[in-house]
Amino acid sequence: MPSKSSDTRENQKKFYDQRIQERRADLEKKGIAPKEINKDKVYEHLMAKRRAIMKAIIAIKVSNARNERPKEAAAEQAAPAPAASKEKKARKEKPEKAQKDAPGKAGD
């Protein structure tokens, strides 16, 4: 089961960043050109893992932001609710409408 903790994912990102740097240094020591380094299968694998971790970090942040919005909205709605009820009471005290006089029947 994948980790949903941003701290864990950040640690994984640091780990893979370090491994990528080490792999790049090893390949440069061997005299491999920078374009060829990007084609190295181990390097590609490490980069793919890093990209997956970055996507997971972004997804965690979006999820946390989505979960915070309802809490903030509920807090905002709870505060003005008493003020709204006072306004409704004031509206209920409207004067009565004048009743229209109904024309009498012609046959009376």
Image: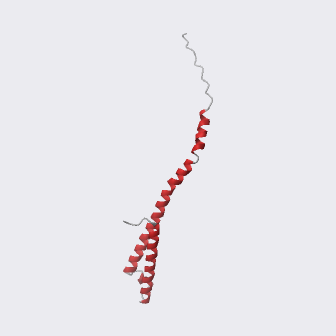
- Considering the image in quadrants, where does the N terminus appear? bottom left
Q: Residue furthest top?
A: 108
Residue placed most toward the observer, 102 or 42 = 42
Question: Residue at left 60%, top 39%?
Answer: 86
Q: Is residue 9 above or below residue 27?
A: above
Q: Is residue 33 left or right of residue 87?
A: left
> How many marks are shown on the rendered structure?
0
Q: Residue at x 47, y 66 (%)?
A: 58
Viewer-proximal residue among 64 and 82:
82
Horizontal and vertical percent position of residue 46: 40, 77
Instruction: Give residue 34's position: percent from left, percent from top.
Output: 45, 84
Quarter holding the C terminus?
Answer: top right
Q: Residue at x 45, y 81 (%)?
A: 21
Place residue 105 in its image quadrant: top right
Q: Residue at x 51, y 55 (%)?
A: 69
Q: Eyeballing the image, is 93 above or below 26? A: above
Residue 107: name its quadrant: top right
Residue 105's place in the image compared with 6, above or below, is: above
Q: How is the image coloured?
A: secondary structure
Q: Position of residue 62 (x, y in %)?
A: 48, 61
> Which quadrant of the view contains residue 85?
top right
Question: Looking at the picture, does residue 40 appear above or below residue 69?
Answer: below
